[in-house]
């Protein structure tokens, strides 16, 4: 997270760190005692035995509990070129015990309107090449897909699929998600509205942050969570 501040896990108890080969790779979100949501590109073609999830910790590298993963499923339409349908669910090998630092968040049923304030959290880069030790949080503004796709402001329609939403970067060096935040939560009005997906660099004007739109992908998430 660029331009954010420290967050305690009790204020984002659905946030997890997805670890591959014992290193923080991505964020993730607790959906139920056994199911975690993350980005498709975080798990795509990874060996399930190498994946663990750290829950209930402010720090990606210690504290809380490290839980092995039993299985995962990436969206059937996920593709690596434009990162469309960048969503996956995984099943933990043992169910979580919920408490003040570990709990689920409900999925939004409607996509957030342009101008909605949303909060993104994660341990991703705070500057080039540097993960955050302590969980970071920043408030951002949702922009509509047309603005995100527009040539002057954004990426073009190839990159901004119907299953994505975006956040504005209105000032250079302002708040944004970055490398290592992928798979983590974008929260508005106490509901999960997005999963961090990608962006061109971080915190640069004219390059919005792109997220999987949870309301659009909700039917897939519910079905996949029941099937794995
Ligand atoms: C990444 O590489 C990444 N500025 C995630 C989000 C953003 C940029 C990069 C958004 O995972």
Image (tube, rainbow, N blue to C red):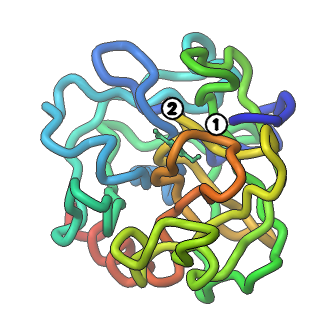
Quick check: 75 above or below 39? below
For the residues labelled 2 and 1, say whether their Cβ atoms are less than 8 Å apart: yes
* Label 1 sits on residue: 122
Q: Nearer the viewer, residue 186 or 220?
A: 186
Image quadrant holding the C terminus, namely bottom left
Residue 130, percent across and down? 60, 15
* Label 2 sits on residue: 180
Residue 192, percent across and down? 63, 66
Confirm or reject: label 2 Cβ below 8 Å from ligand 1: yes
Q: Is residue 85 left or right of residue 48?
A: right
Residue sitting at the far front: 152
Taking the spot 23% from the left edge, 49% from the top edge, the residue there is 72
Residues at marks 2 and 1, CA–CA distance in whole angstroms: 7 Å
Q: Is residue 130 left or right of residue 221?
A: right
Taking the spot 81% from the left edge, 35% from the top edge, the residue there is 3
Residue 167, percent across and down? 68, 64
Q: Secondary structure at mark 1?
A: strand
Q: Secondary structure at mark 2?
A: loop
Quick check: 87 above or below 19? below
Mark 2 and mark 1 lie on one chain; the one further toward the N terminus is: 1
Quarter of the figure with residue 123: top right
Residue 32, percent across and down? 49, 58
């Amino acid at each position: 997270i660029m331009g954010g501040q420290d967050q305690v896990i009790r204020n984002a108890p659905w946030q997890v760190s997805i670890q591959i080969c014992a290193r923080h790779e991505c964020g993730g979100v607790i959906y139920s005692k056994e199911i975690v949501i993350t980005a498709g590109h975080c798990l795509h073609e990874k060996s399930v035995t190498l994946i663990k999830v750290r829950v209930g910790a402010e720090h990606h590298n210690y504290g809380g509990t490290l839980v092995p993963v039993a299985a995962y499923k990436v969206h059937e339409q996920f593709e690596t070129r434009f990162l469309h349908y960048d969503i996956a669910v995984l099943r933990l090998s043992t169910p979580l015990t919920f408490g003040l630092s570990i709990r689920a968040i409900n999925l939004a049923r409607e996509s957030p309107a342009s101008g909605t304030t949303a909060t993104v959290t994660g341990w991703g880069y705070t500057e080039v090449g540097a993960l955050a030790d302590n969980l970071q949080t920043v408030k951002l503004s949702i922009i509509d897909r047309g603005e995100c796709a527009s040539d002057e402001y954004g990426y073009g329609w190839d990159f901004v699929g119907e299953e994505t939403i975006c956040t504005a970067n209105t000032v250079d060096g302002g708040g944004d998600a970055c490398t290592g935040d992928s798979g983590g939560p974008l929260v508005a009005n106490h509901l999960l509205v997005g999963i961090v997906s990608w962006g061109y660099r971080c915190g640069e004007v004219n390059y919005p942050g792109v997220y999987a739109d949870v309301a659009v992908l909700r039917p897939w998430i519910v079905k996949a969570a029941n099937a794995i």
